[in-house]
Image: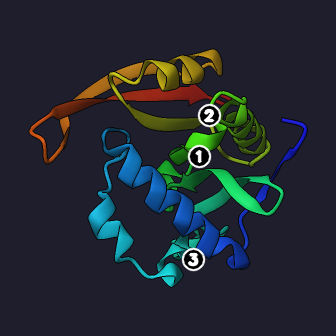
Amino acid sequence: MADITLRPMLEPDLLGYKALRDAMLAGHPEAFTSDAETERQRDIASYRSRLAGGAGGGTLFTLLALDGSRIVGALTCEREPRRKVQHLAHLVGMMVADTHVGRGIGRTLLAAAITRLRATPGLAQVTLSVTAGNRAAIGLYESAGFTRYGCLPDAIRLPDGRRLDKDLMLLRLQG
């Protein structure tokens, strides 16, 4: 990880972010609810909602992992905008480039996100969903303190006919 740096995503990063996301969606359709074909058509400007304060202030941050200037990982955190549920945040879009898997980038992104969330006033819990059969991802989230609170059966239907469940996980940040 010595050659990998983490930082929040900025507007000039949107092209590289889209490139990583398109590659991940195409290569790992079972891991994402979005589909590669639809998302490939998406305009780069639409990813501005993933910048801090984007989409009506719902996005707290998107953290990037960079190898030099190449984006090799990303994780977005969104906060509920409605007053009664503003104590909740959601981690979405965890991605690590295939070329960089196994180097601790996902673990580092997750730890950095949790540190930021714990420092965010008013947040009490963070949730995520993960494809039920993804043992490596589930193990990573459990090692960071997330626990499974439910399952959404038949959450993803792939073109090849597979139907996949999503495990719903939660980390309490504070009382």
The reply to whether dot 3 and dot 2 touch (C-beta < 8 Å) is no
**Secondary structure under the numbered disc 3 in the rendered image:** helix
> Badge 1, how many Cα within 10 Å: few under 14, some, many 20+?
some
Q: Which residue is mark 3?
A: 48
Q: Earlier in the sequence, mark 3 or mark 1?
A: 3
User: Which residue is found at the position 36% from the left and 46% from the top?
Assistant: 32
Compared across the picture, whether 149 is left or right of 53 comes to: left
CA separation, marks 3 and 2?
Answer: 26 Å
Which quadrant of the view contains residue 15?
bottom right
Q: Is residue 122 above or below residue 127?
A: below
CA separation, marks 2 and 1?
Answer: 6 Å
How many marks overall? 3
Residue nearest the observer in this picture, 25 or 49: 25
The reply to whether dot 2 and dot 1 touch (C-beta < 8 Å) is yes
Residue nearest the observer in this picture, 67 or 111: 67
Compared across the picture, whether 92 is left or right of 121 comes to: left
Q: Which residue is mark 2?
A: 101
> Badge 2, how many Cα within 10 Å: few under 14, some, many 20+?
few
Q: Is residue 27 above or below residue 35?
A: above
**Secondary structure under the numbered disc 1 in the rendered image:** loop
Compared across the picture, whether 131 is left or right of 117 comes to: left
